[in-house]
Amino acid sequence: MHDQRPSPFRRAGEDMRTAEEIPDTPQTRAPSYRLAFADEEFLCREELRPVRWQLELMKPELMLSEAGIKSTVVLFGGARIPPPERADTARTKTLADLSKYYDEAREFARLMTIQSMADGGHDHVIVTGGGPGVMEAGNRGAADAGGRSIGLNIVLPHEQAPNEWVTPGLCFNFHYFAIRKMHFLVRASAICVFPGGFGTMDEMFEALTLIQTGRMERIPFLLFGRTFWESILNWEVLAEAGTISAEDLNLFRYVDTATEAVEAIATWGDAGTKRGEIPDL
């Protein structure tokens, strides 16, 4: 538990416990009598939305700082991509074929976690959305290496419970997509995007936009699965149309394997590397 700095004032937690033991009267049952910070109904009022934003921003930030997490490697990817051993359960043949990226995500996370642990385990810690599919693979790979990993879940109607491989003390749940995406990027030292759907593309484009506009430093940005991404997005058409510049095509590279990704991150700043190519080592 976090050591609080010395203070002469009574702790809020103490008053919460004391308030639970007060006599049961019409006055103490009234909503107005509840401590404001312990009143869920009050905290969920429309007018308190800015306070809830702040709480969702602060809680993970404080706990990650207390855990000594300095930088992260972000894994975005589809929740519906199964592990290869369950590829026959996939709803489409394409999803079954994409199951190979579950193994690549797992192996990539394992390799990056080994590197992280060699340097103390505070930098380049794997962070995923905490759910199934590629997210599960990332957390699982970190566990394979005996290291920690972070899960940033969000409350959705049909998903998602945290996968079993997220480090329990580093598993967070969000209401606001925007705050969750900020936490993905605020410590990011590299971003890896695996095949996925709307959510994955939303996360990918937000991160690319921040880098393109200079609101975020340029960091290694890898798209796993050239064939998949080139079939979904024709980046060259955007450049030819002038809606992005030709230089924007150098913001990311394609990779297909965990080994390629590790090499790409290690050589990201090397001069002369072309988009989508891993330099000769």
Image (spheres, helix red, strand yellow):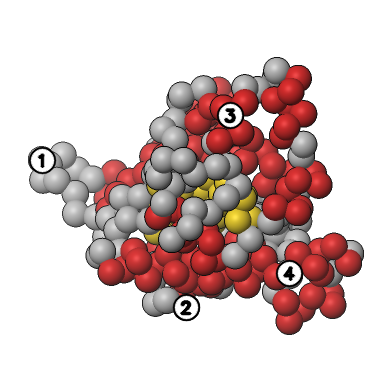
Q: Earlier in the sequence, mark 3 or mark 2?
A: 2
- Taking the spot 37% from the left edge, 71% from the top edge, the residue there is 114
User: What residue is disc 2 on?
Assistant: 144
Q: Compute the Cα span from label 1 to label 4.
A: 57 Å
- Taking the spot 70% from the left edge, 52% from the top edge, the residue there is 226
Q: Earlier in the sequence, mark 4 or mark 3?
A: 4
Circles 3 and 1, Cβ within 8 Å, touching? The answer is: no
Neighbourhood count class around disc 3 (C-alpha, 10 Å): few under 14, some 14–19, many 20 upward = some
The amino acid at mark 3 is Asp
Q: Which labelled disc corresponds to residue 248?
A: 3
Is disc 3 placed on a helix, strand or loop?
A: helix
The amino acid at mark 4 is Ser
Nearer to us in this view, 149 or 279: 279
Q: Compute the Cα span from label 3 to label 1.
A: 55 Å
Q: Is residue 254 visible?
A: yes
Disc 4 vs disc 3: which is toward the camera?
Answer: 3
Residue 152, percent from left and from top: 53, 52
User: What residue is disc 4 on?
Assistant: 99
Asked whether, in this view, residue 136 is left or right of residue 74, the answer is right
Circles 1 and 4, Cβ within 8 Å, touching? The answer is: no
Neighbourhood count class around disc 1 (C-alpha, 10 Å): few under 14, some 14–19, many 20 upward = few
Q: Quadrant of the C terminus?
A: bottom left
Circles 2 and 1, Cβ within 8 Å, touching? The answer is: no
Q: Is residue 167 above or below residue 214?
A: below
Q: Compute the Cα span from label 2 to label 1.
A: 46 Å
User: What residue is disc 1 on?
Assistant: 8
Asked whether, in this view, residue 210 is left or right of residue 122, the answer is right
